[in-house]
Image (cartoon, grey):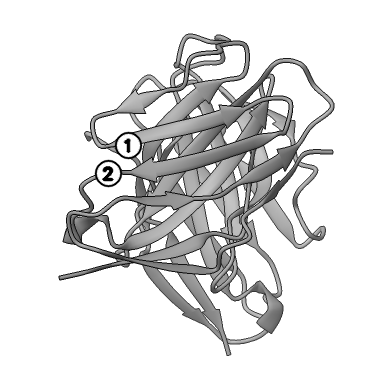
Amino acid sequence: GAGVSQSPRYKVAKRGQDVALRCDPISGHVSLFWYQQALGQGPEFLTYFQNEAQLDKSGLPSDRFFAERPEGSVSTLKIQRTQQEDSAVYLCASSLAWAAGKGTDTQYFGPGTRLTVL
Amino acid sequence: AQTVTQSQPEMSVQEAETVTLSCTYDTSENNYYLFWYKQPPSRQMILVIRQEAYKQQNATENRFSVNFQKAAKSFSLKISDSQLGDTAMYFCASMEYGNKLVFGAGTILRVKS
């Protein structure tokens, strides 16, 4: 596709349920990022992949959050035993590569998945 | 650690007029990048403009330009000839070498007809 796609667009979960959020990056993009955006706030970094390698997961708020990108393209963010504080929009972004100053590091965002935990 | 501050929660501008959105940042790095992203109500984040810190010349993209003051760590966005379609949340963000974006809290811009 032409842009980053995410599915589902909306997800309602009961507290304690597990959820899986999917991100399809732009074809050929090496880097993939996940961000969490609470209502009315700026996105906050969760984790970063370069191809299939997870290079930074410092932003994951707890061990209930897990992300993978096994073949270096599609990524899944999994949240186990969801809590109400997990309610947010989860944004995925991809970039062509990391090449300083060449613009290929510009991140392109998907439409997000709005997660509501009841 | 990187921080980004947007001190204007909301701004309004009349159609066809000019508006400036403020942003200050802090970083300990010498090589970094600054961005303005636009997020319309549909929620898709769109890149507006980017600036490499090593470039002294201010970036411009059509009606959008920045005023990059490196010593003051200031990075404001000027929108000229504002259009109704410019109504959105605007986020300022910084990125250090090879890593994540750090966003400010955002400024809601409303363009009035």
Would you call the spot at circle 2 few (<14 residues within 10 Å), some (14-19), or many (20 or more)? some
Position of residue A70 in the picture relative to residue A2 (left or right): right
Would you call the spot at circle 1 few (<14 residues within 10 Å), some (14-19), or many (20 or more)? some
Q: Is residue A53 visible?
A: yes
Residue at screen point 36% across, 38% down: B48
- Seen as rendered, the residue at the extreme bottom is A118
Could you say which is closer to the camera, residue B23 or residue A12? B23
Earlier-in-chain disc, 1 versus 2? 1
Q: Label 1: state its secondary structure.
A: strand
Q: As shown in the figure, which amino acid type bears the numbered disc 2?
A: Ser
Position of residue A54 measured from the top left corner of the image (x, y, whole percent)? 69, 31
Check whether the beta carbons of the residues at disc 1 and disc 2 lie within 8 A of each other.
yes
**Marks 1/2: CA–CA distance:** 7 Å
Identify the disc placed on residue B80: 2
Q: As shown in the figure, which amino acid type bears the numbered disc 1?
A: Phe
Q: Is residue A83 visible?
A: no
Image quarter (top left, top right, bottom left or bottom right) of the N terminus of chain A: top left
Position of residue A114 measured from the top left corner of the image (x, y, whole percent)? 45, 70
Residue at screen point 51% across, 51% down: B91
Residue at screen point 43% across, 49% down: B20
Label 2: chain letter:
B
Query: In this rendering, do the residues under marks 1 and 2 share a single chain?
Result: yes
Tag in front: 1 or 2 = 2
- Seen as rendered, the residue at the extreme front is B17
Position of residue A17 measured from the top left corner of the image (x, y, whole percent)? 62, 78
Position of residue B12 in the picture relative to residue B25 (left or right): left
Identify the disc placed on residue A108: none
Q: Which residue is mark 1?
A: B64
Position of residue A74 measured from the top left corner of the image (x, y, whole percent)? 44, 37
Label 1: chain letter:
B
Question: In the displayed structure, would residue B46 be above or below residue B11?
Answer: above
Q: Label 2: state its secondary structure.
A: loop
